[in-house]
Amino acid sequence: MAMAMAMDMPEGTVKNVLDQESLKWVFVGGKGGVGKTTCSSILSILLSQVRQSVLVISTDPAHNLSDAFQQRFTKIPTLVNGFSNLYAMEVDPKVEGDELSDEGLDGFLSELTNAIPGVDEAMSFAEMLKLVQTMDYSVIVFDTAPTGHTLRLLQFPSTLEKGLEKVMSLKNKFGGIMNQATRLFGLGDEFSEDAMLGRLEGMREVIEQVNRQFKDPDMTTFVCVCIPEFLSLYETERLVQELAKFEIDAHNIIINQVIFDEEAVESKLLKARIKMQQKYIDQFYMLYDDFNITKLPLLPEEVCGVQALRKFSEHFVTQYKPSLMRGTIEEVKQRISILKSQLQEAEAELERLQKD
């Protein structure tokens, strides 16, 4: 029975994402501080090996993408050093006021923003999607901000719907006053409410089209990143439920910062931590038995720069195997040699103290 279950379990790697050639949008999300940026950077590197062109976008105001690749990125897609088909860009989800005033939308938008929170983000997101769609990348990876923002992005079509309703009610309320005012001050046609309405309408079309794609499991998937702790398990469960509500496909979970019992050193603290982690890892496997769960080892250093990212990427496509197995002759030998060197260090320290 156990054997049959093991065979039914999805493979613990992200190969399924790499093999799905129809994928156009890949979201990588989860609570802050679980390693989303590292995961989205590595996913985009792996995708660049099997797809024609890849764009990785950070919508996180912290902009960790530049840190991960150790290269400065802006809101214009930039080729990542060492690649011929991987591009990165960092977008601030907030629209800057001066950008809007150029189009005469500032006063109008402040009305809207007061009426519906998030419409300014919706506008900038729509602009970005418009831009991305004209660029024609094979696949786009989103390194998203912590969970709340991600789900707000997915609500944008309805946010814009409300925005348009508000505009229409303003139009009915003020009649032709705005058009008269723009003519009176010689501001030209681009300041007229029809131009603004047209722009909003155009954005809604882009967002609706993209949202249809987001709800298509052939085109979009969401990769949840977490760590083996209670809070992260809880947050992931909430995220998976929310995604189901928005009809967004999700069948990959990456559990980061897993401590494998492969150190020959004896540490009560480490052992307690491993035991605690294992409890939550077991719960992840129980709750998400139909998900591809990838376990990544906790490293003694940060994964920074293309070289380190490439090296760490192997754990995304082949399941991590601890270098040391408890109870083997090798492990006992290693433990003895560690204890011997610790004893020598302690004896040398004692001698020094006695001399002093």
Image (cartoon, helix red, strand yellow):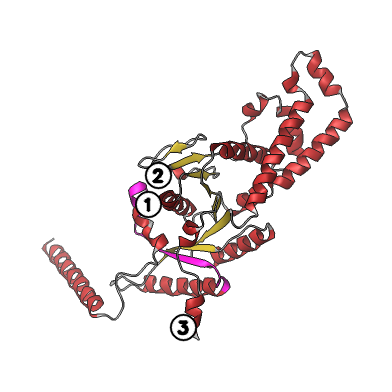
Residue that numbered label 2 is attached to: 69
Q: Earlier in the sequence, mark 1 or mark 2?
A: 2
Q: Nearer the viewer, mark 3 or mark 2?
A: 3
Residue 239 shows in this picture: yes
Q: Position of residue 94 (x, y in %)?
A: 61, 38
Residue that numbered label 3 is attached to: 3
Q: Secondary structure at mark 2?
A: helix
Q: Disc 1 residue type?
A: Leu
Marks 3 and 1 sit apart, C-alpha to C-alpha, by 35 Å
Q: Residues within 10 Å of mark 3 (few under 14, many from 20)?
A: few
Q: Position of residue 120 (x, y in %)?
A: 67, 38
| Above-or-below relation of 108 to 139 | above
Q: Disc 2 residue type?
A: Phe
**Depth check: 154 or 49 in front?**
49
Residue that numbered label 1 is attached to: 309
Residue at horizontal 71 percent and vertical 40 percent from the top: 204
| Above-or-below relation of 329 to 296 | below
Marks 1 and 2 sit apart, C-alpha to C-alpha, by 8 Å
In the picture, measured across the screen, residue 248 lies left or right of residue 167, that is left
Q: Position of residue 264 (x, y in %)?
A: 28, 72
Q: Earlier in the sequence, mark 3 or mark 2?
A: 3
Marks 3 and 2 sit apart, C-alpha to C-alpha, by 42 Å
